[in-house]
Amino acid sequence: MRFDIVTLFPDCFTSILTSGLLGKALAKQIAEVHLVNPRDFTTDKHRKVDDEPYGGGVGMLMKPEPIFTAVESLPILPRREIILMSPQGETINQPLLRELTANYDQLVLICGHYEGVDDRVLNLVTREVSLGDFILTGGEIPAMALLNGVVRLLPGTVGKVESLKAESFEEGLLDFPQYTRPANFRGWKVPDVLLSGNHAAIAKWRFQQQIERTASRRPDLLEKWQQERGGGELG
């Protein structure tokens, strides 16, 4: 999959593109990331990418011309989505990440800054995506989250495909508690059932833990999970 990230601050991505599973995935060419600075597509001597909003107001807006020209300079793959990272967009969640992974070969991520972008940029984008109901200084952090979430779903990024299926949100519930050695750490013991070797009992315990954890931490998710299963039994 190809990612084109339109950003005024390409250096923000230097570390994450060379670290961890994401860095390994890019090294194995499971995905490729290209950073594009709209400032390189300005035509004035000051390389100006922002201006005052018409009608007055606080702050500056990103101008449409550099963004349009930057995106228009990119190659076009058959299945392409142009995404504006915006607090007004749909919230990133696991179903969205799966959709993008399955349906697109190229994701163009536009990172806004200042007070946002000229609204005419919406004529260019095909989707707006948000990290959540809060405001950041720019779209780089949401773009990093989207990039990371999609790449880790691509075949070959995560060693064991099964580990992607048994995670929070994949089945609509939060993940169950997990433990490793030592069996007793500062008086906190691993639940006996996990040491029993009884796989049926372990599976039942884990499912019940998912229900209880989701009920206490994200009751909204549990309600949705039950509705999708027509009332879904809990145990």
Image (spheres, grey):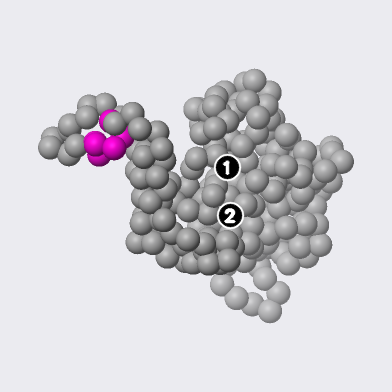
| Mark-to-mark CA distance, 2 and 1 | 9 Å
Q: Is residue 205 visible?
A: yes
Which quadrant of the figure has residue 102?
A: top right
Residue 224 coordinates in the image, percent (x, y)? 53, 65
Residue 194 covered by magenta stretch? yes
Secondary structure of the residue carrying numbered label 1: helix
Work out which residue is located at the far left of the displayed protein and give it: 187
| Magenta-colored span | 190-195
Mark 1: amino acid: Gly
Q: Residue at x 55, y 47 (%)?
A: 170
> Tags 2 and 1 in contact by the CB under 8 Å rule?
yes
Q: Quadrant of the N terminus?
A: top right
67 versus 101 height, above or below: below
Question: Furthest-top residue in view?
Answer: 28
Residue at which label 2 appears: 92
Q: Is residue 2 above or below residue 39?
A: above
Q: Nearer the viewer, residue 156 or 36?
A: 156
Residue 71 spot, x, y in % from top left: 79, 46
Q: Secondary structure at mark 2?
A: loop
Please report the residue visible at 65 percent of the width from the left and 46 percent of the height from the top.
Answer: 98
Which residue occupies the foreground of this view, 228 or 99? 228
Residue 138 lies in magenta, yes or no?
no
From the image, tell me which residue sits under label 1.
149
Q: Residue drawn 71% across and 74% down?
A: 54
The one nearer the camera, 103 or 135, is: 103
Pinpoint residue 91: horizontal percent, then vertical percent: 58, 59
Left or right? Give the position of 71 relative to 228. right
Q: Position of residue 230 (x, y in %)?
A: 58, 66
Tag 2: amino acid? Ile
